[in-house]
Image: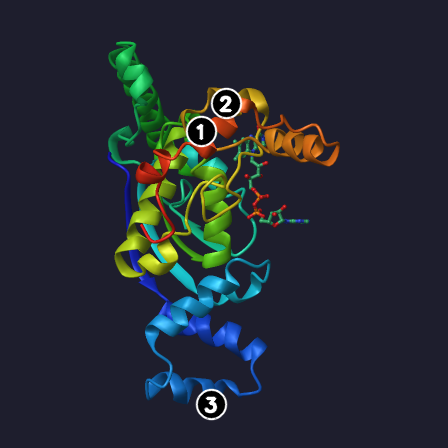
Amino acid sequence: MPIQVTLISFTEDPIRSLYMAYRTCYSTLTPQQVLARVEDERISREQMVQFITERLKTGHASPLEQVSFEFGISGVSRAFSHQFVRHRVGISFEQQSQRYVTYKEGEFPYTVPETVRKAGMEGQMAELFDRVGELYEEMVAAGVPAEDARFLLPNATNTNFKITVNFQSLLHICDLRLCTRAQWEFRKVAALMRAEVMKVCPELGRYLQPKCGEFRLGYCDESEKDWAACPIGRVRPHKDALFRLYDAHRRGELAPLRDEDWAVIEDAELADTAPTADA
Ligand SMILES: Cc1cc2nc3c(=O)[nH]c(=O)nc-3n(C[C@H](O)[C@H](O)[C@H](O)COP(=O)(O)OP(=O)(O)OC[C@H]3O[C@@H](n4cnc5c(N)ncnc54)[C@H](O)[C@@H]3O)c2cc1C
């Protein structure tokens, strides 16, 4: 069963909502007066986006809780769902029940990881799960309730969600779960949620990045070993490297410019090729 993520609904006009939330904090105008200016277009959409962009560079994050998104998520594994529901703040979950839903004829949908497929072990997994399904069915037929027969079911069993998440929490989830250290299935779900938000509000969707993204921390705060192993590490500095640079600067230990560097700087021909401020 493929993973599907669908944006069901979201705050009406997220840009206006966020603008009004921030503007109310920083203005002598009442929210009603701000709204009137938005509605008669004395404040343009570009101005709202510009204002929000500046606020997003600060630590003033609570207005982001005023914008929310509802998603339908299907075809994910219980291995994924155990991780998903660890997020406690700014997100509400409804998940398909294994108590109230009984799998008919012991047939339960499940996810086969690509690594299992590549190892040529999909068939063995299917055989084992067929046997699990048979026993599940026998138990249900013997009067064992679904809530107990499910003790047989594997982590691979599929499940479905309907969730509501506010933008602040979605940013946090993407910080952690778009990181290459997160599990592949969670990365996929987070990427699909991002893609859905991008379709309706790219001005906000672009902020949904792994924490090392240019709109988030901009550097990696995982271990240096993990950073070295990450393919994105090549274009993102590690925090320790930044501190080492800062310490060296503070101690006056930055490598001095060398004669050859000065030669480059003073090279008259370079002026023809170097980009200028106007370029
Ligand atoms: C790569 C990776 C590996 C992981 N490995 C494991 C593992 O091996 N075992 C395991 O058990 N979990 C693991 N986790 C799950 C992790 O420990 C968190 O439970 C999960 O990522 C939810 O994150 P959160 O607490 O930041 O999010 P949320 O619960 O959504 O919290 C959002 C923010 O609110 C803060 N917050 C929430 N509740 C409180 C509170 N009561 N007091 C103070 N601050 C609060 C959080 O610190 C966070 O900043 C892993 C997560 C990742 C990304």
- The residue at 47%/89% (across/down) is 32
* Color style of the picture: rainbow
The quadrant in which residue 183 appears is top left
- The residue at 32%/15% (across/down) is 116
Residues under labels 3 and 1: Cα distance? 57 Å
Residues under labels 1 and 2: Cα distance? 6 Å
Residue 135 vertical placement versus 248 (above, below): above
Q: Which mark is residue 33?
A: 3
* Left or right: 74 as drawn, with respect to 229: left
- Answer yes or no: disc 3 within 8 Å of ligand 1: no
Would residue 102 be seen by someone viewing this image from the given angle? no
- Residue 88 image position (x, y, % from top left): 56, 49
Sequence-first disc among 2 and 3: 3
The total of numbered circles placed on residues is 3
**What amino acid is found at the position of numbered circle 1 in the picture?**
Val
Q: Which residue is mark 2?
A: 260
**What amino acid is found at the position of numbered circle 3 in the picture?**
Gln
Q: Which mark is residue 264?
A: 1
- Residue 59 image position (x, y, % from top left): 59, 58
Q: Are marks 1 and 2 in contact (CB under 8 Å)?
A: yes
Report the front residue among 35 and 260: 260
**What amino acid is found at the position of numbered circle 2 in the picture?**
Glu
Q: Quadrant of ligand 1?
A: top right
Report the front residue among 165 and 15: 15
Q: Nearer the viewer, mark 3 or mark 1?
A: 1
Task: Please identify the quadrant where the N terminus is shown.
Answer: top left
